[in-house]
Amino acid sequence: MSDIDPVLTTYNDIRQQVQIRATVSEEGALREEVFTRWAIDLLEEKGDVAGGEPCACMAPRVGKVSGYWLDRDMGRLTVFVSKFAGTNDPPRMPAADVATLINGAIRFVSKCRMNWHRSLEESSEGFAFGETISTIDFKKTTTNVVVLTDHRSPKLPDFELKIDGKDVTWTVWDLERFHRLLTSGREREEITIDFGVVGNGAVPFMKMPFSNPVYETYLTMLPAAVLAAIYREHGARLLEQNVRTFLQARGKVNRGIRDTILNQPEMFLAYNNGLCATAARIEIESDKGPVAHIRSITDFQIVNGGQTTASLTSALLKDDADLTGVLVQLKLSVIKDRDKVGTIVSNISRFANSQNKVNEADLLANDAFHVRIEHLSRTVWAPARAGANRETKWFYERARGQYSDEKGRRKTTAAKLRAFEAEYPSNQWFTKTDLAKFGNTWDGLPHMVSRGAQKNFAEFTLQLEKGLVPDIAFFQEMVAKAIMFRSAEKIVSGQDFGGYRANIVTYTLAWIAHHSGGGIDLGTIWTQQEIDEQMTDLITAACPSIHKLIVNSGGANVTEWCKQEACWTRIKGNDLGLSDKWKRLLQKWRDAHATSGDEGVKVVERVIALGGEIWLALAKWGRETRQLEDAHRSVASTLARTINSSRRLSERQASEGEKVLVAAKKKGFKTQALQPS
């Protein structure tokens, strides 16, 4: 029997991912749009694109655009165009059809430059795309067309594309290439830097004076113009993933770097710490004594100096800075032991970036938070919905593709698959970026949510409460927020808004959360596993006014306007013209929260007064008697550590602790003997 084609396995995985996401987002009829979102998220996560805004635009005899991303600082426009099949077997796309997609996307851009999009509805995604295009100076912008498809595609012969005399590049992500990215075991496709192409030939590096079986290190002074050219071509792919995530949240150009480039370029080398980078392989053109002339570098990754690299490039593009004579120190470590590359690169990233506060504590705390959420999602049962006869769970994807992988493992028998789907329904799973979207919406950051999945995730990570250990109550509240978000998506999709659904949803829920003063009963939403008719009606009443405020952007591009804090400030202070009925309800919620706040303070005081020893004893008792679930023992242990270290105890933690204590007492736990005499 022949082996199963691994590419076919990847195809089926992609199809399943799209089907699952379509089920969650209620966009089953728009699978190509769901595929576009999935592909952009994947490429953004791996660093192959800086971002992406899905945008389904199509016009007969013109072409279509499926998404776009404009990085004004870097002078880069990325235009996505998708073709999705989702059939039982992966189809093949002739080279001519691929070329047609690329040419159609460029025609669409060209039409928008001539204001053709003004004939479209202002609320449509095509109009938003056209307004963005109309603001671009293409003489200073690099344009790249990215084809996204689940088809098999042949290698396309080179052909010339230009806008305003500037070459347009194009990239094809077909089934074979997605397969390599998803199954190679690497976080990204390797980047090869050829100094014969981006520079004036091989670059002299000072070699490490002794051999080392793990790595070799080389030092040089690289022309800033060469570094900027490399960054313009490869963008965020150059940055090691942890650094890329954190720099997205701290992405403002460093003023000191910029001022030095513009006013004292000859001092840049002296003032700047330079770059620390890694590589898998190098090609040495000549090797004489302590100096090696390196021709090319394979799998080039910057682990320290991302801000310097981006700032140099931005100064070149936005300020027309003259980088002639500007040099950047570069330390390049070539990792010989491929089995250790992940650990070594991670450690270099942590240690080298201490000056940028991308430190070990940040990264490990982030990992611990998500590991804990994952654990809770596998152990906490959600109440049965009305009319259902069994409880379920909400599956958290800490790593990409976990849900489909787990589901695939159960396909050995129909009974196992049915059991998994009953325990983890296909509409009850969420990812790290979903978690950030729910959390930041609730915390009044809809403008951050509107900036895209990865940037919003980076901001969410930075905003996490230091030392936060998610407990059952935290998980239940987050699921309640997910239920609200998913419900709002369905409600907004049912309105005839034409576009901007994602922005309307996050701004509507952020407005409700803000004006309720924290008084929305998330516990009831968790218990019922749905929002009630009252909340449904409130979202339905609020979203039309939110849509009008978003679209009425004062002449600014709507998508860009939604990313600005000024947009949230304006919407937050607006009463949306809601009736007195809704104003009274919001006031009722605010009053309820104020009352519960007083009780919350008392709960915290009671829990602290018991002392850390009682909570340690409770955790030990639960472990020895097996009368407490793992999650409940964890709550007790966390309370003990928090109280004994004099850290701040949240109302949520205290409330959950009291519930665990009451349950334990009913099962025989005694506190009297532990109380001080």
Image (tube, rainbow, N blue to C red):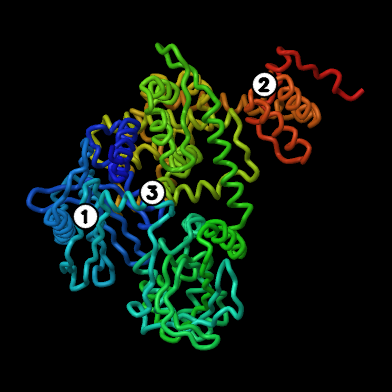
**Three-letter code, disc 2:** Leu
Q: Of circles 2 and 3, which is in front?
A: 3
Q: Residue at x 20, y 53 (%)?
A: 153
Most foreground residue, 181 or 441: 181
Q: Of circles 2 and 1, which is in front?
A: 2
What quarter of the picture does the C terminus occupy? top right
Local packing at callout 2 (Cα closer than 10 Å; few below 14, some 14-19, many 20+) is: many
Report the label total: 3
Q: Which residue is mark 1?
A: 130
**Three-letter code, disc 1:** Gly
Q: Position of residue 296 (x, y in %)?
A: 40, 75
- The disc, 3 or 1, on the residue closer to the chain's N-terminal end is 1
Q: Residue furthest toward the front?
A: 1
Q: Residue furthest toward the left?
A: 61
Disc sitting over residue 539 in the figure: none
Q: Residue furthest toward the right?
A: 677
Disc sitting over residue 628 in the figure: 2
- Please give left or right for residue 532 compared with residue 520 in the image: left
Q: Are marks 2 and 1 in contact (CB under 8 Å)?
A: no
As measured in the structure, the alpha-carbon distance from the residue carrying label 3 to the one carrying label 1 is 37 Å
Q: Which residue is mark 3?
A: 183
Q: Are marks 3 and 1 in contact (CB under 8 Å)?
A: no
Secondary structure type for disc 3: helix
Secondary structure type for disc 1: helix
Local packing at callout 1 (Cα closer than 10 Å; few below 14, some 14-19, many 20+) is: many
Q: Position of residue 654 (x, y in %)?
A: 68, 28
- Please give left or right for residue 393 compared with residue 538 in the image: right
Q: Are marks 2 and 3 in contact (CB under 8 Å)?
A: no
As measured in the structure, the alpha-carbon distance from the residue carrying label 2 to the one carrying label 3 is 40 Å
Most foreground residue, 192 or 514: 192
**Three-letter code, disc 3:** Thr
